[in-house]
Amino acid sequence: MHPNWRLCIFVMPVLIAGCFSISSAQQEGKPVTVVGSSTMTNVVDSLAKQYMREFPNSSVVVTPTGTTEGIRLLIEGEQDLAMASRPLKPEETESAARRGIQLVSAQLGRDCLVIIVHEGNPISELSLGDLKGLFSGAVTNWSQLGGPDAPVVCFIRSFPERGSAVFFKETVLGESTYSPECRVVRKFAITLYEVPKLAGAIGYIGLRSIHGATNRGAKVIGIRKSPDSAAVVPSESTMSDGSYPLARPLLLISRASASPETKRFLEFCARKTAQR
């Protein structure tokens, strides 16, 4: 089991119908290719290695490309599976349908986006509306939210390539857009490094990175769904019970017409994650 699995994912059982009998010729043919969310890469790669040990003639190749690119490659028939850290968009489903493709999502677990600020920032909780103001550029100084007189510096993942950036945009910003002043980073690790260095910084990371953030000098923020609701701190329990507002699904997406080998790997992933 990947060492961060317990921290970052609330595992849910997934049912994939059917039993798959694969001939040796099929097993030794084209590998199952999996692309998409970097959040899921380590976990799915670990499952792939377990799968290949159990079925030595099989091959599974896992490559992080970002959720949006992974789904595009799946729809265009270039890859077998897409890892997604957000639900499918209607336009993605429609794009697949125009090609005569039905997409199937299997939920392997959940993750959540954790909001962090500099540890010296006295603000300890924010509403979704506050977050919208900060990341859209409507709020440019922390004093507007009762904080210190410090300019707001937002760190985000690349949009629309990264599932986390899309999920945050749809959940928090809605019809608004990210401020052009937001600093775009390729990895959560960069946000972890930069936020503790800047007094006015704010960014989002995955739950598995929460301890690294606090150890480096960042503070985790509680989130309120509305201005009057109680703030909820991100944790495995608040993620799994749905009380934390920024929880998200972790999905493996396939074509309904996927190969028997691909379906068997999906069934294997479902079985292994359901046991945890």
Image: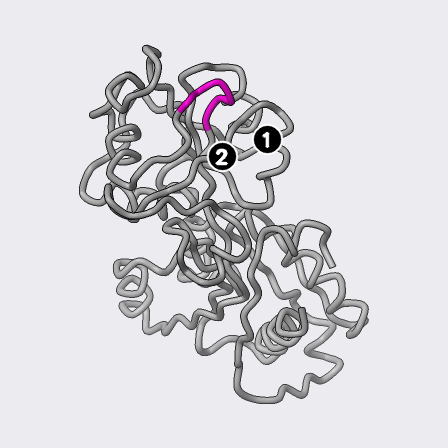
Residue at image point 29% right, 62% down:
95
State whether residue 270 is above or below residue 145. below
Residue 244: percent from the left, percent from the top? Answer: 41, 52
What residue type is disc 2 on?
A: Val
Q: Earlier in the sequence, mark 1 or mark 2?
A: 1
Q: Crowdedness of circle 1 by 10 Å Cα count: few (<14), some, many (20+)?
A: some
Q: Is residue 85 above or below residue 215?
A: below
Range of residues picked out in magenta: 117-122
Is 233 on the left-hand or right-hand side of 207?
Answer: left
Q: Which residue is mark 1?
A: 214
Q: CA distance from mark 1 to mark 2?
A: 7 Å
Is 10 in the magenta?
Answer: no
Q: Tell me the SS state at disc 2.
A: strand
Q: Would you say residue 150 is visible in this rendering? A: yes
Mark 2 Cα shell of 10 Å, populated few (<14), some (14-19), many (≥20) = many
Q: Which residue is mark 2?
A: 220
Quadrant where the N terminus sits is bottom right
State which quarter of the image contains the C terminus: bottom right
Asked if labels 2 and 1 touch by Cβ distance under 8 angstroms, the answer is: yes
Residue at the image position 81 percent from the left and 68 percent from the top:
53
**Amino acid of disc 1:** Thr
